[in-house]
Amino acid sequence: MLTPEHFLPHVNKPVHVAGWHHPLTLTRVDMRRLEEWEREAAPRQPFTVIFRGPPGDVLAEGMCDLRFEDGTSCSLYMIPVFTPQQDRQNYQAVFN
C-alpha cells in the first residue's frame, strides 16, 4: 500500500510517464490530518500527490505507469486539474 513516505523522496524530481513524451515534476505531497474518530478505520494516511507538467500538451486523465529517477515505478490514476498559472499544467493523484 502506497503511503506519503513513498513519494516524499521524489519531490522536485522528474517523473517519467510511460508512453508520454514529457517528464512531470513531483511538486508536493499534501497530507490530510486524520480526525481521532477516523484513525481506527482508515487503512492509511489520506494524501494527494501533485505533479507539474508543461502547458498546452495535457496528459489525459487515467491510469499511468510512472518511473522515478531512482528506478522505482508505480501505476497511478492521474487527473489534470485546473491550473491558473500559464506556465504549467498540474496533475493530481489522490489516496484515500
Image (cartoon, rainbow, N blue to C red):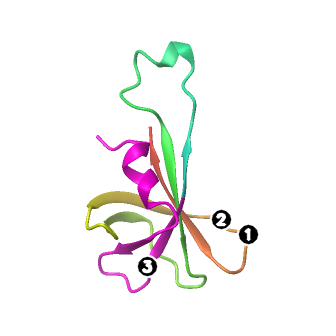
C-alpha separation, residue under disc 1 versus residue under disc 2: 6 Å
Q: Which residue occupies the foreground of this view, 21 or 81? A: 21
C-alpha separation, residue under disc 1 versus residue under disc 3: 20 Å
Q: Quadrant of the N terminus?
A: top left
Q: Residue at x 46, y 18 (%)?
A: 39
Position of residue 68 in the picture relative to residue 93 (left or right): left
User: What number is the disc on residue 71?
Assistant: none
Q: Which residues are magenta?
A: 1-27
Callout 3 touching callout 2 (CB < 8 Å): no
Q: Quadrant of the C terminus?
A: top left
Residue named by callout 1: 84
Is the residue marked by circle 3 packed among few (<14), some (14-19), or many (20+) residues within 10 Å? some
SS category of the residue bearing label 3? loop
Q: Residue at x 38, y 57 (%)?
A: 77
Q: Is residue 52 magenta?
A: no
Is the residue marked by circle 1 packed among few (<14), some (14-19), or many (20+) residues within 10 Å? few
Position of residue 30 in the picture relative to residue 59 (left or right): right
Q: Residue at x 41, y 24 (%)?
A: 42
1 w.r.t. 13: above or below: above
Give residue 67's position: percent from left, percent from top: 31, 69
Callout 1 touching callout 2 (CB < 8 Å): yes
